[in-house]
Structures are given as C-alpha cells and as structure tokens.
Amino acid sequence: MRPLFGFMLCAALSASALAPLPAGAAAPARRFEVSGAGFLKDGKPYQVISAEMHYVRIPRAYWGDRLRKAKAMGLNTITTYAFWNVHEPQPGVYDFTGQNDLAAFIRAAQAEGLDVILRPGPYVCSEWELGGYPAWLLKDRSVLLRSTEPKYTAAVERWMVRLGQEVKPLLLKNGGPIVATQLENEYGAFGDDKAYLEGLEATYRRAGLAEGILFTSNQASDLAKGSLPHLPSVVNFGSGGAEKSLAKLETYRPDGLRMVGEYWAGWFDKWGEEHHETDGRKEAEELRFMLQRGYSVSLYMFHGGTSFGWMNGADSHTGKDYHPDTTSYDYDAPLDEAGNPRYKYGLLASVISEVTGKPPAPTPAPNLAKTFPVSSVKRSASLWRNLPEPVLADRPLTFEELDQNYGYVLYRVPLRPGKGGMLTLKGVHSYAQVYVDQKLVGVIDRRLDQEAVTLPERTGAATLDILVENTGRVNYSRAIRTEQAGLTGEVTLEGQPLNDWRMYRLPMDDVSKLPMSAEPCVGPCFYEVEMTVDRPADTYLDMRGLHKGQLWLGNRNLGRFWSVGPVHTLYTPAPWMRSGANRIVFFDLTGEGAERLTTVKAPIFGKVTNTREAQ
C-alpha cells in the first residue's frame, strides 16, 4: 500500500509550516509538483482533497459562503472549469465582469485557504450549453470542434491567450492559488488524435496556462486515447467504480500519479426523465478507500448550483438520442442547489477527518428559506404582436446564421390553398410548435425523435409559422460538431421544399421593454406578476401552474420550466431580490391566461404534473 499522504502532510505542517521567517528574509517561492505517485507542495508530501464548484452556477454574493463550506468539509482545493461561451459571447467580445469574474472567484477561494485546479477546456462538457463552446463557432459549418482544423484552432488560440491574461497572475508561482491545470477534458471519450492534444498543449503554453502541473483526465476505458505520454494522467468515474478504475489507472501508468480527477458524487437530471439521487454512504466508503490508498481525489460536484438562463446542455451520443438537461444542476451533491448541506456532506466530512487526522468542523447550518406571495397575472403581451423586423431568405437559416445564440426563432412561410399533408422538418433543434394562421396544429420534439406533423386542409392562402426553441445544444459526443440550433435541414410539405422564408429573431435578452397590457392573452405569451418580499431570502418558484417556457426575476434569467419534469421549481436566490415588489416575467409557449405562480421553501421533484405535457 502506498504512503498515506494526508497523514504525512499533517506531520510536515506541525514541524515546519508555522516556523517564522528570519528578519528581513523574503518568502520562498511556492512550489507544487508531481513526485512519483503523489504531489509535493513546497517540498512536502501533499494529498489533494478537492471538489468541483462553478462560479457561473452560483450567485456571486454566495461564492464566499460556498467556499467556506467546502473548507469546513475538509477540502483543501477547489476545481472549476472556465466557460468560454459566457466569456466570449460574440467573436472578440469578452466579459469577465460580475457573475463571470473568474479571477475574483479564484481569489475568493484563496481567501478561504483553498488551492485551485483550473480546467480551461476549451471543451468542458459539464452538462453546459454546447460543452462550453460559444455557439457562433457553428455559423461556419466547415469549422470542426475539437480538431486541428485551422479556423477552430485560431479561435481557441485567441480565447486561451485572453483567458491567460485573467488567470496568469493567479498561478502559484505568482502568489496565486492555482496549483494545476487540466489539458482539454476527457478527450479519450471523443477521439485519439495526439496531434490535437499536442497542439492544444502548445496553445496553453503560449497563453501561460501551463506554467506548473499540466495533466489530462479521462474515464478508465479512455486513458490511452486521451492522454499524452509526458503529462500526468488521472482517471474519472462514478459511484461503485473505484476499485476497477483505480486498477486500470495503475496498469496504464504503473509508476505514475495516483489521482482521481472526477469522482461523481451524484448525477444530473434531464427533462422528462427520472430525478437522480445517489447513495452517499457508498460514496463516503469509496472516498475512504481512495484516500487511504494515497490517492488525491476531486469530487464532482461539491455544489452543483443552477445552469441559469439558457445555459443547460443536452446529452446525446449520436445527435438523435437527445436528452436536454434541466436548469437545476443540484446533482444530488453534498451541498444542494441552494447551498445547504445534505446528509452526505457530513458523511464525507467524517471520512476526510478520519484520513487526515484533522478534527471535523461543525456542519454548517442551512440557509433559511422563505415563501413570498405572488400576484395573479394582471398584464401580458402576445408574442404575435411583438415580433421584430424579419430576416428574409430563400431557405430557413439556423440560429447561428442569424447571429443568435439562444432563445427562440419564429420561421414564417406562405402556404397556397391545398388539401393539407405531411410537413417534414429535417433536423429540428430542438423543439418546435407549428401554427397555421396562428392556430397550433402540432408539436415536434427532438427528445421524442419527431420530425413531422400533418397540416390541415386549406381552402385559401395561409401562413405557416414554426416557433423553434433551442432547448440546449448537445454537450457530449461528436454530435457537438453539428449542433446548430433552429431549423437545420430542409423543410418540405408532401415532399416539396418550402421557400421564401421570413425569420424573426427572438433572443429574449431584454424583457424589460415589452409593452404589457391588461388584455388577456392565450398561446405563446409573456406574462407579468409581482412577488412581494418583506426581507430577501432564498425561495423556490413553484412552476406547476405553467407549461413550458422561460422566467425572469427583474433582469435575471432564472431558467427554463417544463411540465414534463422531473424538476418543478426554479431556485430564486435572495441576492437577486429586493425588499418590496419584485417584477417577474415569464414566457409560456402554451399560455392560457390562468397561469399561477407560488413559492415554496424546497425544490419539488417528480414526474409529469400537466397531462398536456406542454403541447
């Protein structure tokens, strides 16, 4: 059995870490390095005990709270991705402010005494929209994601150099907390092109992102495909897989680093499927097994949080088997979506304390959630009456061709009189409602592998409208290369192509200017209500009185709702409220005018609650 680095660390700290420096002496340069099967930190054996949190999934005002709870559980390191699509929403336009201030998150971790492992991607998976890639990359269909194709690598180079400007000052050698950087992300599950990995490594080095430990991480079956021989390789797996996965890593790299890059301590939910919960007791036992073998470990996730706005991804292996993820990224993690410890937090803390010999900190108290009254709908706005100027083209254009990343696009084309027939939409990404003269005639749902609907007979000329929602681009597998949103293929009626399209861009990036009125609205409608808050506190909006759409609190896009479940609430954090009246706007694809919102203190999980299933 290998040395227990955790116990060795405690002894080393007690002997030397607190010794004062001689008067006038400069602080020695910090060092973090791989030595045999483990790490050395400042020359002393060190066992990384880490877990994942993502700055974009946690309200900035709560970063400190979540990081303190990580430290209290016994973690010494935090792992996070960098999400390219939130930082470069348009080519050459960067945003590292507010919620997207990655450097501030890393500094907050350092303030709590935590090291940081950075995973810059550019591909991150993470059940995040397009695996973290900006959608505009797909406008040119010759661009090949995760390849050596020149236009792709040029975009990656530009992004990584800009990211380096943010994080280089936070590397360990510069006095920051970043002790290691991951190259790519589980590339072996995608391909085995060593030239691609070597080229990306060179980009990292030019960007200053590899001035320390650089490593690859892969699932056990993909280690050989996704690693480089000169870089440390770590292994990823979930509950129940520890013994076999560690054995595969040790066989692959007999004298290499012993580290688990992702131990999946939970799982994520997908629309229309079952809610996931995992066995925290089994996870605690496996963590003990790994730590006692001397392994460094990073849990995925410590706190999942929320994929606010449009940023959930979708799971697919082929592009046809489409499973969009929910807005909630609770993940059944040790901290729940609202940052409260669940039972597995205490179990994992006890294991870490046992292995390291450090006394456990008290389990943090849960945040106090409240309920607030929400008014009935008093004002609304019809989508049909609030369309922008259209874009004209002979064929349907994708979201990317329309320079739109998220939201909806309304596709409109004239119909001649006819007996009706089969309307076929090849490659609907990802959910479409079909109207003739603004009357709903059918729904096409990519989840259900649908692509056709029957149109009724028309005695005169008519207008065909196809309202398409990007329900989340695939974030996994080679399908990411063809994840354009909207109508991505040919549209035919009884086998004949339809031409002369008008397309209305509906990014819904600013709902504050909608001309609301007291006139009742049915169909695709925006609705306005007020939530009265005496004193801000976390709550959950109960969405069971709605069908399918999107919701905003003030100017904050909280995310999606859909009656197919399994999540029927939207987490609503206190820092985004104010005392008094809080304006809520939601867009419901199949509004009835009788929608009702309430608040609850805890999330609601379950199967379908609305038999119409948003149709």
Image (spheres, rainbow, N blue to C red):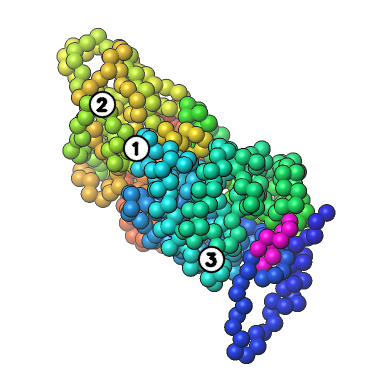
Q: Position of residue 62 (x, y in %)?
A: 48, 61
Image vertical order of residue 17 relative to residue 97, above or below: below
Residue 516: quadrant of the picture: top left
Give the Cα separation between the discs numbered 2 and 3: 50 Å
Task: State the residue lying farthest toward the left.
Answer: 460
Image vertical order of residue 276 relative to residue 489, above or below: below
Closest to the observer: 33 or 270?
A: 33
Q: Quadrant of the C terminus?
A: top left
Residue located 52% across and 35% down the image: 477
Q: Quadrant of the N terminus?
A: bottom right
* Circles 2 and 3: CB atoms closer than 8 Å: no
Give the residue pinned by disc 1.
Answer: 140
Give the residue pinned by disc 3.
Answer: 171
Single out the mark in the foreground, 2 or 1. 1
> Which badge, 2 or 1, is on the more N-terminal residue?
1
- The amino acid on which the numbered mark 3 sits, given as a three-letter code, is Leu
